[in-house]
Amino acid sequence: DIPCVSLLYKLDRLKPAESSTYTPSSTYNDKIALLRNDITKLEVDSIVNAANNSLLGGGGVDGAIHRAAGPELYDECELLDGCVTGSAKITKGYRLPAKHVIHAVGPVYQSTKRQGKHTSLLQGCYRTSLELAVDNKLKSIAFSALSTGVYGYPSDEAAETAIGEVRKFLDSGKGDSLERIVFCNFTEKDEKAYFDMIPKFFPPD
Ligand code: AR6
């Protein structure tokens, strides 16, 4: 089972925010979950892949998802005509326990930072993925830590952008139909970044 943030607060595993400008909401905290796991093992409506512009697979979490989903995933991805950076496209999950895969293309940190576009591109990945989940009537979505591997995005900065964009989406009311939003980390550094950043955007009641 996936522990939600409000449960993690009760277990006193997260530091309360010293100052948060966000309104505490137990409803939101109950929707948000943090865990450290292999995302290919999660039985959720959708997992978000850290893909590249071709959408035809690669290393990291992308390779793991394609291996676990089987060749049918590649066949569907071939029909999608790639995806621009900062956006996402959805496929079925095939042999994965997850019903769908949302393939998001995160920014390469160094080059997009030079252009001042890294934050808005990463925000675009999270926003588009959430919109795709809602548009497809999905109740749960699990994000990998987009761009924090090969693409070189620092974990704390990526966590701030990711969690902030999810909070913005919930505040807009567009995420009302979503029951669970999971941040699925793989490395200790990403997990720590999320544990430190969550209370800023999702302060306890
Ligand atoms: N489950 C969850 N997270 C994972 C897993 C897993 N099984 N494996 C790795 N991660 P990366 P990027 C984490 O490099 O930086 C690919 O070749 C990993 O620890 O997979 O967006 C694509 O095809 C890291 O925190 O993606 C692109 O070419 C996070 O997933 C390029 O890499 C993302 O790391 C995309 O680079």
Image (cartoon, rainbow, N blue to C red):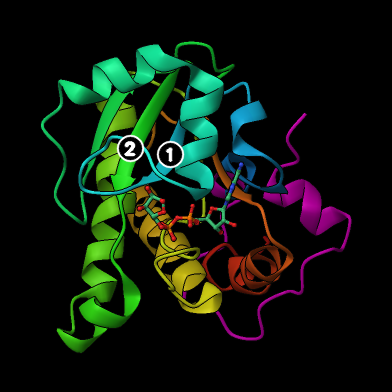
Q: Is mark 1 on a helix, strand or loop?
A: strand
Residue 191, horizontal then vertical, whole percent: 68, 63
Magenta segment includes 168: no
| Residue 144 sits above or below residue 139 on the image | below
Q: State whether the magenta stretch is mostly helix, strand or loop.
A: loop
Find residue 101 and name its label.
Answer: none
Taking the image as shown, residue 184 lies to the left or right of residue 171, namely right
What is the magenta range?
A: 1-28
Q: Does the magenta stretch include residue 24?
A: yes
The amino acid marked with disc number 1 is Val
* Label 1 environment density (alpha carbons within 10 Å; few <14, some 14–19, many ≥20): many
On-image quarter of the N terminus? top right
- The answer to whether the residue labelled 1 contacts the one labelled 2, judged by CB atoms less than 8 Å apart, is yes
Pointer 1: what residue? Answer: 48
Percent coordinates x, y for residue 205 in the rendering? 67, 60
How packed mark 2 is, by other alpha carbons closer than 10 Å (few <14, some 14-19, many 20 or more), is: many
**Residue 174 visible in the snapshot:** no
Kind of element beneath mark 2: strand
- Which residue is denoted by mark 2 in the rendering? 103
10 shown above or below 116: above
